[in-house]
Amino acid sequence: VITDRETALVEDALLDALKSDVTPLTRAARRIVQAGGKRIRPRIVLLSYCAAGGQDMSKAIPLAAAVELLHTASLIHDDINDGSALRRGIPTVNGLLGNGMALLVGDFVFAQTLQILSSLDPWALGILAAATIKLVEGETLQSINEGNAELTEEDLLEIIARKTGALFSAAAQLGALAGAAGPEQTGQLGLYGLNLGIAFQIQDDTLDLVGQPEVLGKPVDQDAQQGKANLALLHSLRCSDQLRMAFESRDAARVRAEIGRVGGIEYALGTARDYAERAKDALCHLPPSPAKQALAQLADRAWQRPA
Ligand code: IPE
Ligand code: IPE
Ligand code: MG
Ligand code: MG
């Protein structure tokens, strides 16, 4: 549905935005963008635009770039907070240049997002500002709850909805609005994005337990080492005292083994599947189109355990 040319236009918009005569900023920001990434959020913008009936893709491309830049800024800052050394298969900005520079590079990317938005319709700024606030709230709640084995699954899902669901939802809404969707369709696509984002984050958390760093391009076992809860863990804590001890002593290998033993991975991926189904349900009132099909496919991929 999305052509190579359109994909390339998003890439151009990303790199174009990251320009400063202070070349270390340009270099550091472009480096992390050029390292790749799945580009799922810009894809959601473009597909939602088409699914809502948008005809002129050039209207959706700056929005797609803005969403991806916001995501990139959040990753640069997230890696500072998580003390991560690897992202997209290359050293993180903080790993390479230190936390102080990474803070600035993240700010730079964020501010360039605002720059793009300043030339677009005002509703785009409103939607992305609201999503950014939720993202920061989610990251803050997660940070406050580090080491908290009593966190409820409901609270965790609320954290996930904010830190990841909100931006996915914004991406879908932006595409919809640019495609001149009415409030009903925009709301439904927003719901699609929210539920997809939740499924996606549950899957990502699960990969921290069972994935491989070479495949993911980022470290694994980090959440357990840092006492960050995830759905598989919270569910498994209910039936394993061993796990509680392993979690409290931040013993990632034992955490992983215990969660595996009591079926926590299957539980988490099952829940991700439920959210992915909800995402697909939210598409039901859209007229059939290749873009709608592609959105449904994204949801199908958000709960399966990659080999
Ligand atoms: C990473 O997002 C952070 C999460 C919300 C899990 P992505 O998995 O989309 O990261 P990239 O952009 O592909 O690197
Ligand atoms: C996602 O959280 C980060 C944001 C939503 C900003 P994670 O900390 O789980 O993401 P990764 O695992 O570092 O990609
Ligand atoms: Mg992280
Ligand atoms: Mg993670």
Image (tube, rainbow, N blue to C red):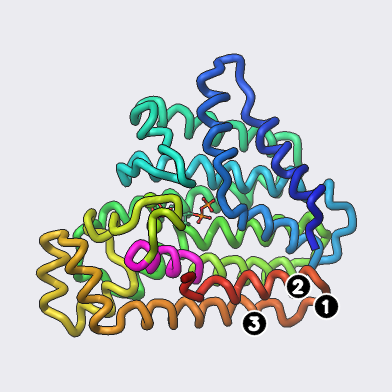
**Disc 1 residue: CB within 8 Å of ligand 1:** no
Q: Position of residue 300 (x, y in %)?
A: 60, 76
Give 89 or 112, whichever is nearer the viewer. 89
Residue displayed at 58% across by 32% down: 30
The answer to the question of whether label 3 and label 1 lie on touching residues, with beta carbons closer than 8 A, is no
The answer to the question of whether label 1 and label 2 lie on touching residues, with beta carbons closer than 8 A, is yes
Residue displayed at 15% across by 61% down: 251
Q: Earlier in the sequence, mark 2 or mark 3?
A: 3
Q: Label 1: which residue?
A: 287
Whether 202 is among the magenta residues is: yes
| SS of the residue under disc 1 | loop
Tell me which corner region of the image, top left, top right, bottom left or bottom right, holds residue 189: bottom right
Type of the residue with mark 1: Pro
Q: Which residues are magenta?
A: 199-210
Q: Label 2: which residue?
A: 292
Tell me which corner region of the image, top left, top right, bottom left or bottom right, holds residue 146: bottom left
Label drawn at residue 281 = 3
Label drawn at residue 98 = none
Whether 99 is among the magenta residues is: no
Q: Position of residue 278 (x, y in %)?
A: 58, 80
Quadrant in the picture for the N terminus: bottom right
**Disc 3 residue: CB within 8 Å of ligand 1:** no
288 left or right of 154? right
User: What's the distance in space between the residues labelled 1 and 2, CA to CA?
Assistant: 8 Å
